[in-house]
Amino acid sequence: MEEQKRCPKREKPVMAVTNDVGNLDHIHPKDKRTVGKKPASVALKKDCKKDIPFSWPIFSSMIIEGKRILLSFNHAEDLNTDQETLKLFEIAGSDSRFHPANVKISEKKIIVFSRKVKKPVTIRFAFSDTAQARLYNGSRLPAAAFRTDNWPFNL
């Protein structure tokens, strides 16, 4: 019998984003193969050093410029969406009231703004239980939900 090579054990936990595969009516997605490939890709890249795409766009920083917020990401080559209008971004001022945001993708950055928020201070992306995020990098890996505030979240 041929001995199989094993990858070393991973010391840090890593997340695999599956919010583009889920089923809003049931917690268990029907497409289990795609869901399983995502953490497998992370393990193959990180632990077995395979040359494959593994990481989704990861929020890295925010800059407020007047009435808009510029968001930067890591692993964001060829940011794109399959929606006519990228949804699921919300923006708020110091009053803590979130409003749906307008969004423009520009290279590795996203510009977020709303006429309802004159002085923005924070944004949230895909911040609900039913969000099906449709923001991808060039490897077609979806961005995870994130927020730039630490305000209490009221259900």
Image (cartoon, rainbow, N blue to C red):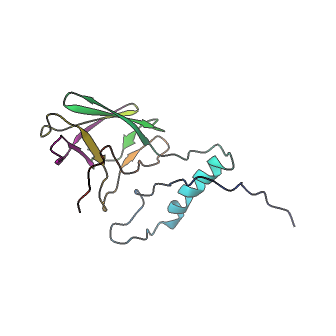
Q: Position of residue 25 (x, y in %)?
A: 33, 71
Q: Is residue 86 at least partly visible in the picture?
A: no
Give the quarter of the image for residue 105: top left
Q: Is residue 80 magenta?
A: no
Q: Image quarter for residue 92?
A: top left
Q: Which residue is pictured at 40% across the width and 57% down the height?
A: 19
Residue 72 visible to an observer of this rendering:
yes
Q: In the shown orientation, is residue 37 left or right of residue 18?
A: right
Compared with 34, 114 (above or below) is above
Residue 94 counted in the magenta span: yes
> Which one is in front, 47 or 140?
47
Q: Which stretch is magenta? A: 89-106
Please report the residue visible at 45 percent of the width from the left and 69 percent of the height from the top.
Answer: 30
Locate the N terminus and report the quarter of the image it occupies: bottom right
The image shows residue 28 at horizontal and vertical percentages of 43, 71
- For the C terminus, the image quarter is bottom left
**Residue 89 percent location from the top left of the image:** 27, 46
Relative to the observer, which residue lies in front, 52 or 148?
148
